[in-house]
């Protein structure tokens, strides 16, 4: 199936009891059994729920994977994946990544004995240098949040395979429409489905997708044993969002391209981070592993001060100043004080995330209106 057909049909079936074409919201905590152990595959709603089952199947299909495992948030998904490891295990991560993921790793998991190395993976050779006999996983985002660095997934898969380590890719910024890491050799894909998959800023959700049955079984066990599961209403919203992912993504990409070019020629803008520019350091990799370049970008002003950035951030009328991304409406944010505030300042700056960086999640409104809004805010 091609993506457009897959996002609408794969993994979902009409409701067996009524024929309802849309998966019903099974708002129930338990399922009646004929007698102990005699049931229809559903016992208790933390363990299984029919709305969640269809969502998990649909998400797996969207990433060309066999097994989908859903959680109450993107961070709950990442947290569950980290539970596969034990004290002493080492994980190599991108140094430009969502601040909450960094916080989860450093503040929650490091005290339990996992060791994290945060490195620049724009050059995959840096990963080889960070490998040790204890390396158990390589964790990356591409494009990265918020500096839009591009990491070569196939090259990382080869390095991980040779080192007997797992490769996990946070595919949130690209979405399953633009990039499918499992096809490029990744072992696990993670999504904050709160973003493009949901697409309407009305649900928080996360998922893990894999083709490896052994890993999937461990993750299903942890999903039930630890219990960070999504409710059925949230699963319904995600199923609905997924059906229009391809149409929304096409417009996010079109608008993103127009806005990136507008910003780049603006006299007050010093630098635009967007992987669609031919002179982006890893544009050639983006071109091979992504279908298009997406609607996420960040930029720096020539007046490199927080005051100047704040002025822009508080002057837009259509772009809303808010955390999150990937919804139909455009958002503008200040990573240093918002989404990445949990990364220590020195580390953030050393990695290239300045105090004045502004991030955009370009929505699917009219591009001219969006450009007009940014133009007046910059003016
Ligand atoms: O918010 P949650 O659904 O728990 O997902 C966390 C997460 C994981 N990975 C990436 C790449 C993310 O961007 C996020 C969440 N990010 C934001 C809220 C943000 O504004 O960047």
Image (cartoon, grey):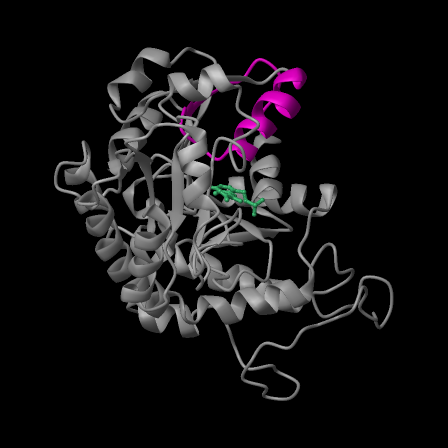
* Quarter-of-image position of residue 47: bottom right
In the image, 209 versus 149, the foreground residue is 149
Q: Count all numbered tags in the image, as a single digit.
A: 0
Q: In this view, does 114 lie above or below 6?
A: above
Q: Residue at x 31, y 11 (%)?
A: 129
Q: Where is residue 191 in the image (x, y as percent from the top left)?
A: 48, 48
Q: Give the range drawn in magenta.
A: 85-112
Give coordinates of residue 280: x percent, y percent.
Answer: 18, 36
Q: In this view, does 257 lie above or below 97?
A: below
In x, y percent, where is residue 273?
A: 28, 38
- Residue pushed farthest right? 35
Foreground of the two, 238 or 319: 319
Q: Is residue 144 left or right of residue 67?
A: left
Q: Can residue 245 be seen in this view?
A: yes
> Foreground: 236 or 48?
236
- On the picture, is 38 further left or further right than 358? right
Q: What is the quadrant of the N terminus in the image?
A: bottom left
Q: Please give the name of the residue rendered at 32% of the width and 30% of the height, measured from the top-left corner.
A: 303
Q: Foreground residue, 196 or 168?
A: 196
Question: Is 92 inside the magenta-drawn segment?
Answer: yes
Quadrant of the image occupied by residue 338 = top right
x 57%, y 27%: residue: 342
Whether residue 168 is visible, yes or no, is no
Q: Which residue is drawn at 51% across and 71% down?
A: 240
Question: Residue 136: within the magenta?
Answer: no
Tell me residue 155's x, y (percent).
Answer: 25, 30
């Amino acid at each position: 199936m091609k993506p457009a057909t897959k996002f609408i049909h794969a993994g979902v079936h009409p409701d067996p009891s009524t024929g309802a074409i849309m998966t019903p919201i099974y708002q129930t905590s338990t399922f009646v059994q004929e007698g102990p152990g005699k049931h229809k595959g559903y016992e208790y709603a933390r363990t299984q729920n029919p709305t969640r089952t269809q969502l998990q199947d649909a998400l797996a299909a969207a990433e060309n994977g066999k097994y989908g495992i859903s959680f109450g948030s993107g961070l709950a998904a990442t947290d569950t994946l980290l539970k596969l490891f034990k004290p002493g295990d080492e994980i190599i991560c991108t140094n430009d990544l969502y601040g909450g993921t960094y916080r989860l790793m450093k503040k929650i998991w490091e005290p339990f004995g996992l060791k994290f190395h945060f490195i620049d993976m724009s050059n995959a050779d840096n990963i080889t240098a960070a490998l040790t006999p204890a390396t158990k996983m390589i964790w990356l985002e591409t494009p990265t949040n918020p500096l839009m660095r591009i990491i070569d997934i196939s090259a990382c898969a080869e390095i991980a395979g040779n080192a007997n380590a797992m490769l996990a890719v946070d595919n949130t910024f690209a979405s399953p429409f633009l990039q499918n890491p499992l096809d490029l050799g990744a072992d696990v894909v993670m999504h904050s489905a709160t973003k493009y998959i949901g697409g309407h800023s009305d649900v928080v959700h996360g998922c893990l997708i894999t083709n490896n049955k052994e890993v999937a079984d461990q993750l299903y066990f942890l999903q039930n044993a630890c219990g960070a599961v999504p409710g059925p209403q949230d699963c319904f919203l995600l199923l609905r969002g997924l059906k229009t992912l391809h149409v929304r993504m096409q417009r996010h990409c079109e608008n993103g391209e127009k806005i990136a070019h507008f910003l780049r020629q603006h006299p007050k803008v010093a630098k635009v981070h967007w992987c669609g520019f031919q002179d982006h350091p890893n544009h050639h990799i983006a071109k091979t592993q992504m279908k298009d370049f997406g609607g996420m970008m960040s930029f720096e002003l020539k007046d490199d001060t927080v005051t100047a950035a704040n002025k822009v951030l508080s002057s837009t009328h259509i772009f809303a100043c808010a955390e999150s991304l990937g919804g139909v409406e455009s958002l503008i944010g200040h990573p240093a004080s918002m989404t990445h505030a949990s990364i220590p300042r020195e580390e953030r700056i050393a990695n290239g995330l300045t105090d004045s960086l502004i991030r955009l999640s370009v929505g699917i409104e009219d591009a001219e209106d969006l450009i007009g809004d940014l133009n007046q805010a910059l003016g």
